[in-house]
Image: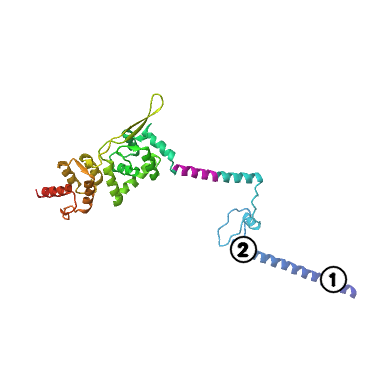
Amino acid sequence: MELIWEQRARHARGAEGMRHWTDFQLNSHLSTLANIHKIYHTLNKLNLTEDVGQDDHPTGSLRSCSSSDCFSKVMPPRKKRRPASGDDLSAKKSRHDGMYRKYDSTRIKTEEEAFSSKRCLEWFYEYAGTDDVVGPEGMEKFCEDIGVEPENVVMLVLAWKLDAQNMGYFTLQEWLKGMTSLQCDTTEKLRNTLDYLRSLLNDSTNFKLIYRYAFDFAREGKKTMIQYRKTDLGSIKVEKWNEEKDQRSLDINTAKCMLGLLLGKIWPLFPVFHQFLEQSKYKVINKDQWCNVLEFSRTINLDLSNYDEDGAWPVLLDEFVEWYKDKQMS
């Protein structure tokens, strides 16, 4: 009997221990779940959780990365595909073609900008026709093409640069030599050079050279001309004629025109001097008188107060000063 009670008591203690053990495990699980709930609640406040099925998330101080972002961070960068041999050759050919086109366009542009004697020669014969000289008709067309009046002072400067010997004519040799020095072989290039030619007049040294050249360029007398003309039989016939220039003087009308061209806009006394020449007895002007007029315009005051009558001035200027003073007094 005692044995039975002892067994029952032992069994009861075992059952109670088992019950205590089960309760302990249950409490542990509940505690773990409670901790997990707290952690999730905390993460939810910090916006670090992601609701299933939602695409947008509110913006916060911290954000969870999307699956694609995380994937891109985890996965290594994808390497570029190595081109096949055919692709590589095509790419190289494309680069080479681009480089060639760029070089070719630069080369063409350089050739167009560079001076060409052949192009200059062809340009000359546009105005000379079958002759080796540009005459009055060709000169008129030439002035029209470059947009300059024949009596414009820039044409005198151009003639000076070409070292032309006869007014209204450009020979082949003068054209080639002068245009080569200017690096002009087309009408457009010469148009772009006109401002440079005008600027030469602003330099006192160049102006003096052009002024002296103008006297020889405009002297009386006809020109030495050589004309190449085809005969009816197709042969070339050379026609040449000479008439010596008057080496000593320039007729008064031509002198007045050339002085007006060169000094009319820069010498305030020119209108008065021009009036003096018109009423004077002078029919020609020699080179010494011509050169002294320029010196007079540069050195003598407008009121003539510093003019020395005993100086080495030509009689022409002595008479002008006397005439001008009498005109002012009257």
Determine which residue is flagged by label 2: 43
The overriding secondary structure of the stretch rendered in magenta is helix
Secondary structure under tag 1 reads helix
The percent coordinates of residue 182 (x first, y second) are 38, 45
Instruction: Tell me if residue 108 is in the magenta stretch.
Output: yes
Asked if residue 108 lies left or right of residue 160, the reply is right
Q: Disc 1 residue type?
A: His
Asked if residue 57 lies left or right of residue 309, the reply is right
**Is residue 151 depicted above or below 79 in this figure?**
above
The percent coordinates of residue 287 (x first, y second) are 24, 45
Residue 1 in view in this figure: no
The residue lying at 11 percent from left, 47 percent from top is 327
**Is residue 108 depicted above or below 17 in this figure?**
above
The residue lying at 22 percent from left, 44 percent from top is 286
The residue lying at 21 percent from left, 51 percent from top is 296
Relative depth, front residue between 199 and 129: 129
The percent coordinates of residue 220 (x first, y second) are 25, 38
Q: Could you give the CA–CA distance between mark 2 and mark 1, rounded to whole angstroms?
A: 48 Å
The percent coordinates of residue 84 (x first, y second) are 66, 46
> Quadrant of the image for the N terminus?
bottom right
Relative depth, front residue between 226 and 188: 226
Asked if residue 103 lies left or right of residue 25, the reply is left
Q: Are marks 2 and 1 in contact (CB under 8 Å)?
A: no
Q: Which mark is residue 11?
A: 1
Write down the region rendered in magenta.
99-112
Residue 11 in view in this figure: yes
Mark 1 nearby-residue class (10 Å; few <14, some 14–19, many ≥20):
few
Mark 2 nearby-residue class (10 Å; few <14, some 14–19, many ≥20):
few
Q: Quadrant of residue 257?
A: top left
